[in-house]
Amino acid sequence: MKKSIIVLVVLLALSVFYACTPKESGGGKGPVTVASMIDSEGAVLGNMIIQLLEANGFQVTDKTEFGTPDILRKALEAGELDIVVDYTGSGQYYHEGFDPAIWSDPVRGYEQTRELDKTRKNLIWLTPAPANNTEMLALRRDFAAANNLRDMRDFAAFVNAGGKVRLIAAQSFADNPMGLAGYEAAYGFKLKEDQLILLSTGNTAEMLKALAEGINEVNVSLVYGTDGALDKLGLAVLDDPLQVPPVYLPAPVIRGPVLEAYPEIETLLKPAFMSLDLLSLQRLNAKVAYDGLDAGAVARDYLITAGLLSE
């Protein structure tokens, strides 16, 4: 009886081990399950990962546009997914009790998230794209050029010199010490109440429409840095050299056992993510969200043009 129980326990342990360990079959590699959040950017980046893996002999299960950030994270931790597209600044939510200012530094934030996830969860963050999809301020390009506004220092000087400003943003962003309140403190300016239009929600589509059309004299808006609307509407993002809000760089996150089985994945994905700057991601997002193009086709065209995938 005892011997039977021992055998059963061993068999169960082996079944769990093999279920969680990538397997190669028929000379191929995988299967590897790739997932992303429900948005155009996640779909494009997820498809880039899939196409690069498939071009290099991997069998891939496509779970792009899998769900919201919390659902994606839970599934990754549970071993239901192998590689996901996530953002470095999210580390502050996955690991509490640290100074939030760490995640406003693109290097320290990435390294902190990478180290914590590696040691606590055996999840490995690969090389991120140098494109910050955080809360930023946007202007019409013609207005920015006419007033020589490139970054938040220029904007602060413009405000302090009496320049005409009407900002539309979410109330939560205006009050946040890592949002508008943080910008004001860091760059030394202060917007008056009549210079603000504050909304109860963070729906940036409504805000950007007001900015593009000059509704209620709006000439500045809250935006997420890689939003596809920026390119379509002729808008420019103000750079934030002091990195006030948390930095959200998109990166592949892979389960430890999968990377151990296939270490070449890190080398395969690195050039693609390193090539993606703010403007290129804005344009790719716009092709999906506004032109209605297929995310897989957009990803493929980009990889071919960048010389990372053969036709």
Image (cartoon, rainbow, N blue to C red):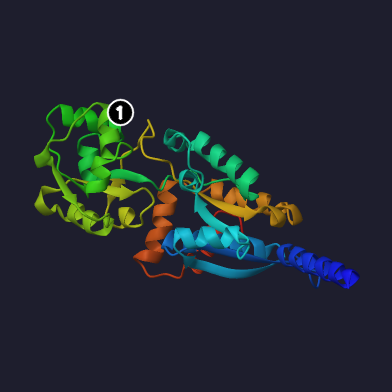
* Residue 174 quadrant: top left
Badge 1 element: helix
The amino acid sitting under disc 1 is: Ala
Q: Is residue 187 above or below residue 301?
A: above
- Image quarter (top left, top right, bottom left or bottom right) of the C terminus: bottom right
Q: Is residue 275 above or below residue 152?
A: below
Q: Which residue, given by chain and number where applicable, does mark 1 sit on?
A: 186
Residue positioned 81% across, 67% down in the render = 9
Residues 27 and 174: in front is: 174
Q: How many marks?
A: 1
* Residue 219 quadrant: top left
Asked if residue 179 lies left or right of residue 21, the reply is left
Residues 203 and 72: in front is: 72
Q: Is residue 182 above or below residue 271?
A: above
Task: Give x and y (percent) for residue 281.
Answer: 43, 53
Residue positioned 9% across, 41% down in the render = 194
Binning the other alpha carbons within 10 Å of mark 1 as few (below 14), some (14 to 19) or many (20 upward) gives: some
Residues 198 and 212: in front is: 198
Task: Give x and y (percent) for residue 30.
Answer: 72, 66
Q: In this view, does 299 lie above or below 196?
A: below
Asked if residue 193 lies left or right of residue 300, the reply is left
Task: Give x and y (percent) for residue 6.
Answer: 86, 67
Which residue appears farthest toward the right when viewing the image?
3
Residue 24 seen anywhere in this rendered image of the structure: no
Residue 10 seen anywhere in this rendered image of the structure: yes
Residue positioned 38% across, 32% down in the render = 241
Asked if residue 230 lies left or right of residue 212, the reply is right
Task: Give x and y (percent) for residue 139.
Answer: 24, 45
- Image quarter (top left, top right, bottom left or bottom right) of the N terminus: bottom right
